Each structure stands twice: as C-alpha cells, then as structure tokens.
Amino acid sequence: MNLIEGMTTIVLNKNELDRRQSQKEMNFLIVMFIVKLLSIALVSQVLWPRIIPEIFENVKPNPGFLNLLGLSIIVGLLL
C-alpha cells in the first residue's frame, strides 16, 4: 500500500509543478505582449513622425496605432 500512496503523491506534486510552470510561462507571454504593444505605441507616437518622413518622401508622416500594429503583424508573419 505504501508504494501506491507514494506514487500518487509524486503524481500530484508533478501536476502542481506543471501548473506553476505554465503560470510562469503565461505571465512571461503577457509581459512580452505588453512590451511589444508599448514599443509599437512608442514608434507610432515618437519615432515614426520624426524620422521616417525624412528618410522616405512618400510615407505618411503620422500613421495611426492600428496601421503600425498591422505592419508589425505582417512583418512577424513574414519572418
């Protein structure tokens, strides 16, 4: 009987460890998603209007957040 009870304790501990690991991974993904959105907002509000029109003449000087988000998604899919 001790052998079976010991195995169930190991299995229950493993499930708890898997849950903790998946929670850590989910928190990391959420933080990375927020960082990506903040970087897109930074580019759309600060960097794009000042730098890109000087480099390229036919580019919109002030694109919206959704335009840059779409551009980011397309570039992500292509890479």
Image (spheres, rainbow, N blue to C red):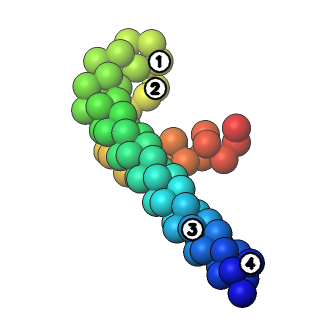
Residue 60 percent coordinates (x, y): 38, 33
Looking at the picture, tell me which residue is in the foreground, 70 or 24: 24
Q: Residue beneath label 4, please?
A: 3
Question: Which secondary structure, mark 2?
Answer: loop
Q: Residue beneath label 2, please?
A: 58
Q: Which mark is residue 30?
A: none
Residue 55 percent coordinates (x, y): 45, 12
Residue type highlighted by circle 3: Asn
Q: Residue beneath label 1, please?
A: 56
Q: Residue at x 52, y 68 (%)?
A: 16
Tell me which numbered mark, 4 or 2, is placed earlier along the sequence.
4
Q: Residues within 10 Å of mark 2 (few under 14, many from 20)?
A: few
Residue 65 percent coordinates (x, y): 33, 46
Question: Which secondary structure, mark 4?
Answer: helix
Looking at the picture, tell me which residue is in the foreground, 39 or 70: 39
Q: Residues within 10 Å of mark 1 (few under 14, many from 20)?
A: few
Looking at the image, is mark 4 or mark 2 nearer the viewer? 4
Q: Residues within 10 Å of mark 4 (few under 14, many from 20)?
A: few
Q: Residue beneath label 3, please?
A: 13
Looking at the picture, tell me which residue is in the foreground, 35 or 75: 35
Tell me which numbered mark, 3 or 2, is placed earlier along the sequence.
3
- Asked if residue 61 can be seen in this view, the reply is no
Looking at the image, is mark 2 or mark 1 nearer the viewer? 1
Question: Which secondary structure, mark 3?
Answer: helix
| Marks 3 & 2, CB-CB < 8 Å contact | no
| Marks 2 & 1, CB-CB < 8 Å contact | yes
